[in-house]
Each structure stands twice: as C-alpha cells, then as structure tokens.
Image: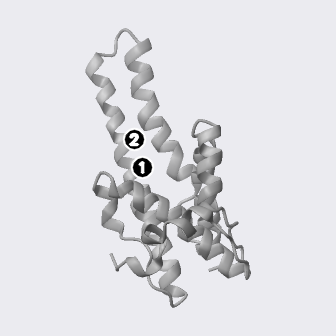
Amino acid sequence: MSNQLGKPRPLWRVLALSAVTGLAYYGWYKWVIQDELHRYTGSDWSGAVCLLPFGMGVGLPQLLRLYDPDVPGWFGWFSLLGIVWIYIVQFRLYRTVNRLYRTAGQPEPLIVWWLFIPGLNLIVGLRQIHFLSEYWARQRGDVIDDPIARRLPLFFAAETSSTS
C-alpha cells in the first residue's frame, strides 16, 4: 500500500451533493474513490475501468435500439450487462474496504453478500460510503463528524457487521 491516502467524504455530504446534482456527484464520487483506492492499494481497478464499461454497457444498447433502425428492439436488453458489471464493481469495492479494515486490525464493517438483497444493498452501499470515509480520516489522523451516521448507529456501527 502506498502513502497516497484518499480524502474522507462523509455520508451526509455525498448524499446531499448527489441529491442536488441529480446523482452527477455520485458518479464523480464513484470514479474518484476507485482512483484513490487504485493508487493506495496498487491493485484495485481505477475509476475508468469501473465506470466506463457500466456507462457503455447501459447506454450503448439503448442508443442503438432507439436510433439505429437496423437494430431490433430486444437489443436493449443487453443493457443488463452494464448492470451486472456494476454489481461486480461494487462487490470488489466492498471486499476492498473490508480488507483495508482487516489490515488495520479492525473488524470488517461491510457484509458483502447484502449487495444481492434488495433493500440491504442500499444499506451496505451507504455503509461503504461511511466506512471508507472513516478509514481515510483515521489514516490521516482526522476525526470526521457525520450527523447521519451519528443519528443512526444501528446502521453505521462497525460492531453490527460480520465477515463476508
């Protein structure tokens, strides 16, 4: 692991900026955290590797289906490949966050298999944002106050997790 630490981004800020920008900030957030983890670990996928296949996988089949008269309507179903790709990316991201915590001698905060259960996938995604921010803050010697995590300890306490 390198000494190039990522920047703590509290959950409240990610949610607020994502809401205000119509999720554009969230796309940028996903890209930048993947780049930070890639630089830090030296082994994780970059933001481009994670998000470009997703964007192309979801968008290209729809564009071809709509604007190319030679492409049959069922071709739009190929967009599911982009969805499958982002699940693979999320699975790897959650494992990486758990590995960072494990390497630091702390309990793994994310239950990776929650990714595949509707409802729980949202909770584990929010937990990932929180715990990655907490990890970067600790590595920098900072303390980040996150009012959402503070008010919802049931969802954001590390003790509620188990290994994947």
Image position of 80 with respect to 46: above or below: above
Residue at screen point 36% across, 67% down: 112
Residue at screen point 63% across, 48% down: 16
Image position of 69 with respect to 104: above or below: above
Residue 164 position within the rendered picture, expressed as x and y whole percent measured from the top left: 33, 75
Q: How many marks?
A: 2
* Side of 31 where 118 appears, left or right: left
Image position of 40 with respect to 159: above or below: above
Instruction: Classify mark 2: helix, strand or loop.
Output: helix
Q: Nearer the viewer, residue 93 or 107?
A: 107
Residue 135 position within the rendered picture, expressed as x and y whole percent measured from the top left: 60, 76
Q: Which residue is mark 1?
A: 86
The amino acid sitting under disc 2 is Gly
Instruction: Classify mark 1: helix, strand or loop.
Output: helix
Q: Quadrant of the N terminus?
A: bottom right
The amino acid sitting under disc 1 is Ile
Q: Nearer the viewer, residue 4 or 27?
A: 27
Q: Are marks 2 and 1 in contact (CB under 8 Å)?
A: yes
Residue 68 position within the rendered picture, expressed as x and y whole percent measured from the top left: 41, 12
Crowding near pointer 1: few (<14 within 10 Å), some, many (20+)? Answer: some
Q: Which residue is mark 2?
A: 82
Residue 106 position within the rendered picture, expressed as x and y whole percent measured from the top left: 50, 87
Q: In the rendered image, which quarter is residue 11 located in?
A: bottom right
Residue at screen point 36% across, 33% down: 79
Crowding near pointer 2: few (<14 within 10 Å), some, many (20+)? Answer: many
Q: In the rendered image, which quarter is residue 19 located in?
A: top right
* Side of 37 where 72 appears, left or right: left
Cα separation, mark 2 vs mark 1, equals 6 Å
| Disc number placed over residue 144 in the picture, else none | none
Residue at screen point 39% across, 62% down: 91
